[in-house]
C-alpha cells in the first residue's frame, strides 16, 4: 500500500526531475546569484503573484526559511504573534527562540490567528512597555497545521487588524498551493501578495525534490535576508538546483495552468476521495478536510493498523483513549491509492 505519512516522501514530479537532468551538466554561478535559472524562476514567480518589484529568494526547507524570514523581520526585543499550533512553536526545535526572537502565543484553538486574540496579545504586551517583548509580526500558515484553509474574509480581517497596528504578516506557505486549490477556496495568491509583507511558496511538499521560495516586500527583510541566510546556514552553494525546480514548476503548461498548482490539485482530489471513503465507513473527521491533510479519530487498534499499513502519524492521544491520526496525500497519490486505503479501513471496521 502507498504511504500516507506525509507529502514529501516521494521524489520530484516527472517534469521537475527531467529539468534537473537536462541542466545537470550546466555550469552556473553559485548561491542563487545571477544564474539564469534562478533569475528566470524569480521572474515567473513575480508574474504569478502580481508583484513585479517583490524580492524573491530561495531556501532549501521550511524551518530554514521560517527562521530566516522571522529573524530578518524582527529585532531582538520584538516578537511574532502565532497560534499555539503554529509550526514555529511546535515542530522547529526552538529555531526562532535560538535566533533571539520570541513567539507570542494567542489563545486560538483552531489553527487560525483571530483579530480578537491578536488584540489580547498586543494589549498585554504593550501594557508592559519596555518590560515586555513588543509584538511586531504575525505568523500564519496556509494551510493551517490541522488542515484549515484561510478564507478571503478571515485573512482580510486579520490583515486589516495588522495594518491598524502597523504589524506585518508573514505567511508560511509550505502547503499554500493546496490551500489555493481547495474546493471552496476564495483567497487568491494575488490577495496574499497584496496584504502579506512576506510569504513562502512551498516546493518540498508540492512536487519538488526540495525548496521553498520566499516572496517579500518588507524593507527590513530585504536588507537582512542575505546576511541572515548565510549566518544561519541556509545558503546553498548549488543554488541553481532550487532555481531549476521553481522555474519548471512556475512555467505554465500549454493551457496556461501552473504545474505548481496542478500538483496540489491532484493531491487535493485524492484527499477528497479518501475523505469520502473513510467518512462513509463511519470514521469521524477532525479539523479541516479541504486540503491534502486529513485528520480522523480512531481507537488504539485502528491507530496501530493504519500506522503499520500506510505510515499514518498520530497527532494526539485524547483523555478518552481515542487517537487523532493524520493522512496526507501528494502530487503522486492516485485515486486508486485512496480507494485501496479505504478498502483497508473497511476491513478494520468489519472486524469490529
Image (spheres, rainbow, N blue to C red):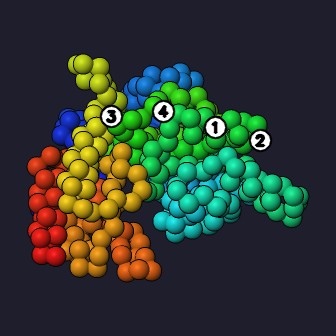
The answer to whether 14 is drawn above or below residue 318 in the figure is above
Disc 3 secondary structure class: helix
x, y percent for residue 262: 27, 34
Within the image, what quadrant is residue 266 found in? Answer: top left
Q: Is residue 157 left or right of residue 236?
A: right
Spatial separation of the CA atoms under disc 3 and disc 1: 26 Å
Mark 1 vs mark 2: which is more N-terminal? 1
Identify the residue shown where x is 25% and y is 23%.
253
Residue 54 has which mark?
Answer: none
Mark 1 vs mark 4: which is more N-terminal? 1
Spatial separation of the CA atoms under disc 4 and disc 3: 14 Å
Residue 165 has which mark?
Answer: 2
Nearer to the camera, 131 or 271: 271
x, y percent for residue 76: 74, 58
Residues tagged 1 and 2 counted as in contact (Cβ below 8 A): no
Disc 1 secondary structure class: helix
Q: Is residue 143 visible?
A: yes
Q: Label 4: which residue? A: 187
Mark 3 vs mark 2: which is more N-terminal? 2
Q: Farthest top residue? A: 255
Nearer to the camera, 180 or 258: 180
Q: How would you rate the neighbour count of disc 1 (Cα within 10 Å): few for under 14, some for 14-19, many for 20 or more?
A: some
User: Which quadrant of the figure contains the C terminus?
Assistant: bottom left
Nearer to the camera, 7 or 152: 152
Task: Name the front one of labels 1 and 2.
Answer: 1
x, y percent for residue 286: 39, 60
Spatial separation of the CA atoms under disc 1 and disc 2: 13 Å
User: Which quadrant of the figure contains the N terminus?
Assistant: bottom left
Task: Name the front one of labels 4 and 2.
Answer: 4
Q: Label 1: which residue? A: 157
Amino acid at each position: 500500500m502507498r504511504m500516507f505519512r506525509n507529502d514529501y516522501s516521494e521524489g520530484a514530479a516527472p517534469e521537475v526531475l527531467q529539468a534537473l537532468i537536462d541542466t545537470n551538466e550546466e555550469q552556473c554561478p553559485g548561491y542563487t546569484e545571477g544564474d539564469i535559472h534562478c533569475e528566470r524562476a524569480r521572474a515567473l514567480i513575480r508574474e504569478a503573484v502580481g508583484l513585479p518589484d517583490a524580492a524573491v529568494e530561495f531556501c532549501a526547507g521550511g524551518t530554514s526559511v521560517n527562521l530566516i524570514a522571522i529573524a530578518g523581520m524582527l529585532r531582538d526585543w520584538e516578537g511574532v504573534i502565532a497560534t499555539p499550533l503554529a509550526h514555529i512553536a511546535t515542530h522547529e526545535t526552538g529555531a526562532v527562540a535560538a535566533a533571539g526572537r520570541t513567539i507570542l502565543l494567542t489563545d486560538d484553538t483552531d489553527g487560525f490567528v483571530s483579530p480578537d486574540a491578536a488584540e489580547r496579545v498586543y494589549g498585554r504586551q504593550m501594557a508592559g512597555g519596555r518590560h515586555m517583548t513588543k509584538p511586531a509580526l504575525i505568523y500564519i500558515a496556509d494551510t493551517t497545521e490541522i488542515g484549515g484553509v484561510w478564507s478571503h474574509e478571515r485573512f482580510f480581517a486579520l490583515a486589516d487588524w495588522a495594518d491598524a497596528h502597523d504589524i506585518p504578516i508573514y505567511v508560511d506557505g509550505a502547503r499554500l498551493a493546496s490551500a489555493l486549490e481547495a474546493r471552496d477556496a476564495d483567497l487568491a495568491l494575488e490577495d496574499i501578495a497584496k496584504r502579506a509583507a512576506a510569504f513562502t511558496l512551498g516546493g518540498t511538499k508540492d512536487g519538488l525534490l526540495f525548496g521553498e521560495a520566499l516572496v517579500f516586500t518588507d524593507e527590513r527583510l530585504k536588507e537582512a535576508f542575505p546576511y541572515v541566510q548565510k549566518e544561519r546556514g541556509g545558503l546553498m552553494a548549488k543554488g541553481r538546483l532550487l532555481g531549476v525546480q521553481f522555474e519548471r514548476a512556475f512555467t505554465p503548461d500549454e493551457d496556461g495552468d501552473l504545474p505548481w498548482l496542478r500538483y496540489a490539485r491532484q493531491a487535493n482530489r485524492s484527499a477528497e476521495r479518501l475523505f469520502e471513503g473513510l467518512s462513509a465507513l463511519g470514521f469521524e473527521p477532525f479539523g479541516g478536510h479541504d486540503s491534502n491533510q486529513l485528520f480522523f479519530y480512531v481507537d488504539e487498534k485502528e491507530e496501530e493498523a493504519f500506522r503499520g499499513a500506510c505510515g499514518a502519524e498520530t497527532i494526539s492521544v485524547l483523555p478518552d483513549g481515542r487517537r487523532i491520526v493524520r493522512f496526507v496525500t501528494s502530487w503522486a497519490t492516485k485515486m486508486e491509492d485512496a480507494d485501496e486505503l479505504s478498502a483497508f479501513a473497511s476491513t478494520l471496521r468489519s472486524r469490529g
